[in-house]
Amino acid sequence: MTATTQTAKTGGAKRAAKPKASDAVKRENRTGWAFMAPFGILFALVFILPIVWAIYSSFFRQVTTGGGAYGGGELVNKFVGFQNFQYVITSGAFWAGVGRVVLYTLVQVPVMIIAALALAMLIDSYIVKHITAFRLSYFLPYAIPGVVASIIWVYLYNGQISPIVKGLAALGIKVDFFADNVVLGSMANITTWTFTGYNMLIFLAALQAIPHDLYEAARIDGANGFQIAMKIKLPNVRAAALLAMLLSIVGTIQLFNEPQVMSISDPSISKSYTPMMMALNTSQGTLTPGGDGPASAVAIVMALIAGVLAVVYTLVERKVNAE
Amino acid sequence: MVSHNKRLVAALAAVAAMGMGLAGCGSDTANTDSSDGGKVTITYMHRLPDSEGMTLVNDIVAKWNKEHPDIQVKATKFDGKASEMIKKLETDVKSGEAPDLAQVGYAELPEVFTKGLLQDVTQYAEQYKDHFASGPYSLVQVDGKAYGLPQDTGPLVYFYNKAEFEKLGITEVPKTQSEFIEAAKKAAAAGKYIMSYQPDEAGNMISGLAGASGGWYKVKGSSWVVNTETDGSKATADFYQQLLDAKAATTNPRWDPSFDASIKDGSLIGTVAAAWEAPLFMTSSGGTGSGEWQVAQLGDWFGNGGKTGPDGGSAVAVLKNSKHPKEAMEFLDWFNTQVPDLVSQGLVPAATTEDAETPSEWSTFFGGQDIMKEFKTANNNMGDFTYMPGFSAVAAKMNETAAKATDGSGKVADIFSDAQTTSVDTLKNLGLSVSE
């Protein structure tokens, strides 16, 4: 639709003077939109449409209306206005879940980013030989799907079969990776293990884009390696750090694989441990109220919270940068 | 203009092709109405194990297909949990692509009915009624109407390693609660456990144990009367609490590798289990104690007076938009009475048309015992326990609370008080009436 109107506008203005050029512009526009089409159509179908549908269904609840003890064998989509949102916002379980992911993000993301930055600096420095091998081996955990990584780690955490737990026990150290106040840390460890290498690559790319003349100039001025790292490299990867932080925040807010897999070994990890688990289990009816309506409301409220957090982070970052 | 049109056509074709690709995603189990020339196709979705050494569902179905060219059946296995399968069926029914037949656990049947996924097949079920035990047959009914046929049952029994028991000087399976706890303490002192407390199975198993002496959910008029804190529940809570306090039971979740490890290293030598667990238990054990294990009936440990309760067991139900319920039921009756084949899948068949025999590998593991006979005894000794719609939310909550009792941050009795509140909430949220 937009294609035609836009073509008409630009074409119309130029038609009087250069009718030929207008045809060319028209064709160009059309070609542009044609190139956009594969992306545009898929984007609309698998991204925009589901979001619109989720928003729509969040105003409904699936209830029985048939009466009797079993409700007549039919669930009806009942319009409930903002009742689902009211449920989510007043749900203690939801906010407990939000609290967990926020705490998780506050601790895990800085640790991971600093580790990634340190590794990238190390690889980028002149100290390290065989860069390719290191780069690959740091990145390797990212190639393992999140669920599989979680399964491997759950095995390593498991009190009865883990070589780590058994080894430490032999040294007289008793650890329980599933203890109530440790379990979140155990999850953070899985995420850190998986994504540090990935973030390192972002930093490494930024580091290698720094012109090497800067280093030479600094050396001539008498700067040593550490000074170069702190005064030249660090300021230059700020943009990369912002990107890596944002991606990580968005990722950790959606924390799902780790707790889901770990709940097999530790059933006290509840069905609403994180908001994303709560959304899935609500839609499957293992939490009540169940169904797509309340589940969509959980997802939407969480998306809003994540959006707000991301914007706040960007603003703070910008302000700090400006100073 | 010509070129323009050509391009338009090409673009449309591309979009159409994409649409086809997307449409293809969900239509694997489509209820294809291929009634050309009287031939119908029935689709059937199950969650049977289909493991090595079993008679595969597809092989059983192939036998039927060979003899019935007019009713062709296509079976698909759903790899995933029951709650995930229900979600899939729910979506499939909405989009008109659901299979004709689907496996539904007895605990989930009222829920699946309430969700509007089932078709009333009472008129076809009547003629097959005599082929099945009456208890399971009634569990496929809601409000007196039938929605499918029962496949297997899951009475709770006790698995124990007789040789290990004798080594500990426990000459027979304890009969009363106090005897059991005494024996458990004695075993624990020697580093052995004669009971497992399985937090991830609390919703299925502990509800069954507590329900052996009387149900939780009753219908009065058209509303629900919920009482999950019955005398049976109190006795069950008391039993496990004492064992946990004395550290005389393992607390590994059933489906965690640590549970298997506890059998393999010989520390777990007795546990309550559902009958269908026999082959799974054999796999879990890795052969440890083969020939020494036995199956016994539950003692009076849970205020159950020698009765047992259900844990699992499934029916196969006819789904709402099946266009061939008559043919589907005809196949289903045949399938659910293929007793030896179903036994090979680890099931205790609900069919009464033929005596189920204990497979030889099972009796090797269980010391030559005819364990199928024990399962049948347990089956006939099962208390009435009906489930409410939305029970999966209750079971999930019970598991979570049960896990808190393992590290002392909660009590076993909390399982039942949480079950009460979750049950009432769930019923209300479904729009059903609850009398309190």
Image (tube, rainbow, N blue to C red):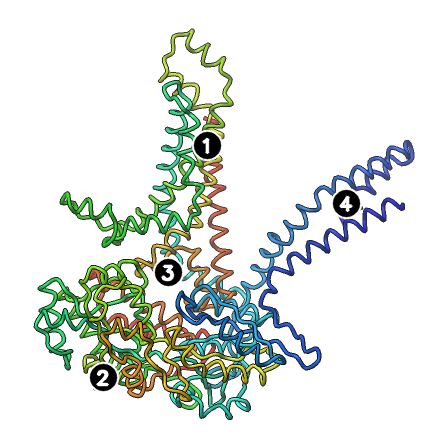
Write down the residue under mark 3.
A93
* First in residue order: circle 1 vs circle 3: 3
Write down the residue under mark 4.
A3
From the viewer's side, name the closer residue of A75 and B142.
B142
From the viewer's side, name the closer residue of B151 and A275.
B151
Q: Chain of mark 3?
A: A
How much space separates mark 1 and mark 4, taking CA atoms? 39 Å
Callout 2 environment at 10 Å: few (<14), some (14 to 19), or many (20+)?
Answer: many
Write down the residue under mark 2.
B304
Image coordinates for residue B213, horizontal then vertical, percent:
26, 85
Question: Are dots 2 and 4 on a single chain?
Answer: no
Residue flagged by tag 1: what amino acid is it? Leu
Does residue B436 show up? Answer: no
Q: Chain of mark 4?
A: A
Between label 1 and label 3, give the one nearer the viewer: 1
From the viewer's side, name the closer residue of B393 and B33.
B33
Secondary element at tag 1? helix
From the viewer's side, name the closer residue of A107 and B65.
B65
Secondary element at tag 3? helix
